[in-house]
Amino acid sequence: MKYIDLHTHSTASDGSFSPSKVAMLAKSADMKAIALTDHDTMAGVEECFKMGLQLDLPVIAGVEMSCVYNSKEIHILGYLLPDNFPAKNLHIKDEVLADLEFFARERADRNAEIINRFKKDGIIISMDDLIGSNPHTQITRAHFADALIKMGIVADTSEAFLKYLEYGGKYIPVKKITTKRCMEFLTKHHFFISLAHPFQYKFSDTQLESLLSHLINSGLNGIEVYHSTHSDEDKKKLNFLAKKYNLFPTGGSDFHGAHKPGLNIGTGYGDLKVPYTILEDILSQNKY
């Protein structure tokens, strides 16, 4: 059997490994294809793609968009599928990158608000504390967690999220980007679109199906059936929903390196296996 990983992160957002290193780790894990899906950015894709060419590892250009649905943050994966696979050249239009700047500005404004909220409580976090040696990274809550750990305020990432970084909590404002705005961007540029880790949002069955219906009406193509946190029962439920709503199953580890200890590229927490046939089905149907 051949396996893939269509959900990975690098230092272009909140992963701990460079885009090149992500490709190398994937190759070492015997992945037959990966997608780099950093948060609201595709800045690391070219580096990862070039390393993939050297390693004979197909790399798909991807992104994980963050948006709000019914006051909850949800994540939507977008993939720029090549006309011919595996691609020998990377084609990301300048307009795609230009449109992504809107989301980057929104994220920057929100990060400034988070910094200000911490400051009011006497916790001084600078931009230098957040970006470290990577000035082009997209700052996420994981960066704030790292800063809090280095300052000695918390012992680890789990404590940071529990005490300080809860979405919609005292320090973390609810995002302003709507699902409508994200889907408009993704459909405009002909991404293949999949809902990431559907059970992470803790919706009821009815709420999850309402979300799916809402996104399908806006151009959703797939649903992430395979994920490091999904049990066999979870995968069974999601495969049922995929068939019910005529969606393609997708899957990936959600690899972040050191920011998610014990979660490895390709295999997640040890038993993740995303079949290569998942990608073959997406490419053969050309439904995007």
Image: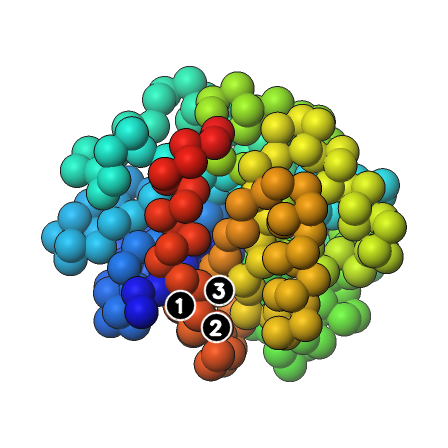
Mark 2 touches mark 3? (CB < 8 Å) = yes
Q: SS at mark 3? A: loop
- Whether residue 287 appears in this view of the structure is yes
Q: Which labelled disc corresponds to residue 266? A: 1
Q: Distance between the residues labelled 1 and 2?
A: 7 Å
Mark 2: which amino acid? Leu
Q: How crowded is mark 1: few (under 14 residues within 10 Å), some or many (20 or more)?
A: many
- Whether residue 42 appears in this view of the structure is no
Quarter the N terminus occupies? bottom left
Mark 1 touches mark 2? (CB < 8 Å) = yes
Where in the figure is residue 128, as x and y percent of width and height?
50, 52
| Left-right relation of 286 to 152 | left
Mark 1: which amino acid? Gly
The residue pinned by badge 3 equals 253
Q: SS at mark 1? A: loop
Where in the figure is residue 216, as x and y percent of width and height?
68, 33
The residue pinned by badge 2 equals 272
